[in-house]
Image: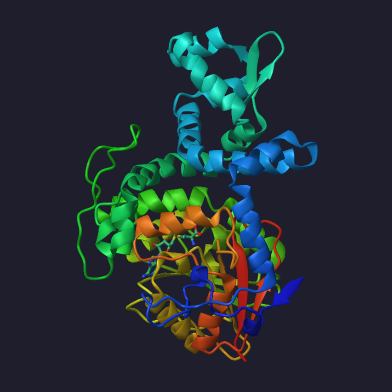
Amino acid sequence: MTLNIELKRYPSISPAMGLSQASSNPSTPVEVKLDWRERFRNRIDRWMVSPQLYRLSVSTFFTRWYTQKRTREVFDLMAGFVHFQVLLNCLRLGVLARVQQSPCSLAELASHVGLPPDRLDRLVWSAVSLKLMDQRSGARYGIGPLGALVVSYPGIEAMVEHNALLYADMADTPQMLKSPEGVDNAQMHHYWPYTFGEQAKKRITPNPVLATGPHHELDAAQSSERYSQLMSVSQNFVIQEIIDNYDFMHHQCVLDIGCGLGRFASTLAQHHTGLELLLMDLPEVVKLTERSHVNTHYVSRMRFIPGSFKTDPIPSGADLVTLVRVAHDHCDADVQALLGKIHAGLPSGGRLLLAEPMADARGDRQDAYFHFYLMAMGEGRLRTPQKLSSMMQHAGFSRVELLSNPMPTHARILIAHKT
Ligand SMILES: C[S@@+](CC[C@H](N)C(=O)[O-])C[C@H]1O[C@@H](n2cnc3c(N)ncnc32)[C@H](O)[C@@H]1O
């Protein structure tokens, strides 16, 4: 099922859309007339913070649940950074891997990870409280429902380890919020060398945060390999969302821009035996991509194109262009230019498929993570489907559809049509 995006229904007022036009002079206070719903909401919000109402609400059976819910939500906001440390330590110490094999006692676990039981117990209880582990009979601990997910998918485990970088960067977010230069020393920015721009030649710094990481400087090839491996191992869920929700049957040739190691393209090649595939990425990455497919039975249907979409022409010949987790890494001007090039290179009737996590125009819980991740990375932005659709239409696409895929946490999918 698809939903046509009608831009009229999404006025350009949400800051998340990056299109705010509320006032041309931000320092001028604007007198805003509130409608009855907003007035009612404001009144409720004022009531909710009153200590008298709090006590009344807690003592009343019918309202207690709501006060409890709000209190937990605020507590979770405050505690999120500790939750991440619990997860990271459970993985690094091998606690989750051990209890996944079989439930065991605290003493057995302590001897396995080499920590005294009276230190490890805090981690174990925290992990139980976060559903990473759970309590079993006979004072044993087993893998919990969330822990089972984390250790069953290498992509999740790799992303948790990768997030240790973001965690370190989050210590200095005021600088990042103040100016673009605030990200100059961000670990996340240095992890993705293409975020330095075409001209800048910054040094790729070692990663002091990850105890398991190599403590030496990475050259361009090593750093491209590092991020490409991470992308490849974390791409499963995204690929699944795309191939389950879009029909590639009617296409002859697909150009995947920012293809990484080519997992998406190789999945397409295996599902659709008549499909030709063009794989474009930066030269250091394409070398690796080509190497990892050279001995496959479908390599004869693949063409590898080293180049930058910013400075090189986009290859022609495809009737579908795909951008998977690419646009959100780049600033509006670069994405707009890329969309224009893609539109110009497509034949009439051709399509663009853009898949990546997107912001909710009303704000969704997971948006905060991506907004800050992309800020630490450099110039990227989490955009709403409406903002991307508007950019696509500006580039010349006549119609844009938002697919209603079931797991938008992994990616939302837009299809732009060229008439
Ligand atoms: C976040 S990764 C996504 C990779 C893959 N599509 C996936 O979903 O796993 C972004 C990819 O875009 C590539 N990329 C970044 N800037 C590029 C440019 N100017 N031209 C071509 N590819 C670029 C990167 O090398 C990287 O492989």
For the rendered model, the colour scheme is: rainbow
Q: Quadrant of residue 168?
A: top left
The answer to whether residue 329 shows anywhere in this view is: yes
Q: Is residue 111 above or below residue 42?
A: above
**Is 308 placed left or right of 206 in the picture?**
right
Q: Residue at x 48, y 79 (%)?
A: 22
Residue 145 locus on image (x, y percent): 67, 32
Residue 114 locus on image (x, y percent): 43, 13
Residue 78 locus on image (x, y percent): 49, 40
**Is 210 placed left or right of 37 in the picture?**
left
Q: Residue furthest right?
A: 62
Name the image quarter holding the C terminus: bottom right
Name the image quarter holding the N terminus: bottom right
Say which of 108 and 174 sits in front.
174
Q: Quadrant of residue 192?
A: bottom left
The answer to whether residue 278 shows anywhere in this view is: no
